[in-house]
Amino acid sequence: MSFEFEQPVIAEKREALDDKWFDRFSACGSFEDYEYLGGEKGLRDNQKKLFISGECENPILDYPDLEKININQREQDLLQLKKDILDQESNETVKQAYRWKINAKIAELRMLKETKSENDRRFLRYSKFIYGQPEKEIFDYTMNQIRKTINKKIKDPNENIRISAQRLLNELGDYFESTSSDIAELRDFMKESSEAGNFPKTEFEAEEIKNAFEGALERYKLSGWEVLIGDNFTAIGVSQENKTVNIPTDRKMSEKKLTALIEHEIGTHVLRRENGERSKLKLLGLGLDRYLKGEEGIATYEEQKIEGANEFAGLEGHLAISLALGMDGRKRNFREVYEILKDYYFINSKKEESEAKTYAENTAWNRCVRTFRGTTCDTPGSCLTRDIVYREGNVGVWNVIKNNPEEVKRFTVGKYDPSNSRHIWILEQLCISEKDLEELDSHDETLEN
């Protein structure tokens, strides 16, 4: 199989302004909080059965990986590193970039502490500090999309679909806000700017997916990364800490989806890390503070360039978090968000009814586990707000593309958010631009496997 890609641009290594600090920061700050919020498959599966059958109101999520990280030691190391940087670093921009980043990583550690102590409200406080909370303008836009779907499905000839749509209307129907014309206009710009490519209807299994990712890493001349297949992986993703690409054993994917995902994971996540570590500021390899909206915004934009786009990415994650936080006026726990999502997935499914019911249950469960991971699942309004970054990041990146298209040239210099004015300030102060990216001599235009 072959995949068509644009010519990759990879930076050459150079002496960095933060050589003195980067390795120390990497040793204590190169981690992602969510990687410690997974659970043991058998225990999670048992909780799922109890929950879906109604034998328990909310599941009890286990977090065994929290025992793998020494939270207190990492926090002390980060605090000492911040003190040393503030005392010794002469470049004020480098100093500020590390101050912001270290503060965010300390917040991640303290959030994990609250998971261990089962303090949901303090967990939420740290989550909002790290990832923010949903923007009302985007939530209103999403709710208008949901409302249109409900209004259509409430007249469906299938009685069970009508009943589910009516439940959604009863739960959400009182909330209605006019959609911002700016977002609607940006959506139209996105639709006009992204056009799906033509691909054969070929489906690949996990081993073939693994081969394609390995080929992409080779094509980009990226070493030190490993592609893994495993039963415990729930989705294809990149671990920045372990430098791995993780693929579920039972994963299958079309060629179009696979091509888009490679651009998402390798052409964005991995390439931005490698280029960042080769830049004047190595910290760009691990990401400036709160870079994730830009990271996922660019990654989803790259996918949309291949698959086309009629809507912004990340609706379901943004909706689930917004409903949990009570953006419509009512805070909700795991069960309450699950019931809404289950009806939403059911009325939108094109599967046969019994399959649609099972699909809705499984998908709503998986989404709620992502939304409430790190919490007890019992406290209305407390969740992990991380997944808002996909939708808000996608909106933000398309806004940059529309209003400042020259910034696109700099997207792959490292992990920063092009819609974050503080990040632009850092890059401008350090004179980091697309000119720092230099093409290596030879790259094939196609990836052969």
Image: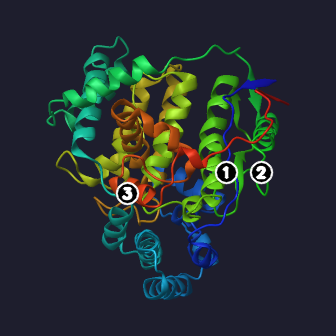
The amino acid type of the residue labelled 1 equals Phe
Relative to 80, does residue 41 appear above or below in the rendering? above
Q: Position of residue 383 (x, y in %)?
A: 37, 59
| Colouring convention used in this rendered image of the protein | rainbow
Q: Which residue is mark 2?
A: 228
Q: Which residue is mark 1?
A: 233
The crowd level at tag 3 (other Cα within 10 Å; few <14, some 14-19, many 20+) is few
Q: Position of residue 103 (x, y in %)?
A: 41, 74
Q: Nearer the viewer, residue 377 or 24?
A: 24
Say what secondary structure mark 3 lies in.
helix
Alpha carbons under labels 3 and 2: distance apart: 38 Å
Say what secondary structure mark 1 lies in.
loop
Relative to 165, does residue 82 appear above or below in the rendering? below
Q: Is residue 414 left or right of residue 392?
A: right
The amino acid type of the residue labelled 3 equals Trp
Q: Nearer the viewer, residue 50 or 43?
A: 43
Say what secondary structure mark 2 lies in.
strand
Relative to 364, does residue 127 appear above or below in the rendering? below
The crowd level at tag 2 (other Cα within 10 Å; few <14, some 14-19, many 20+) is some
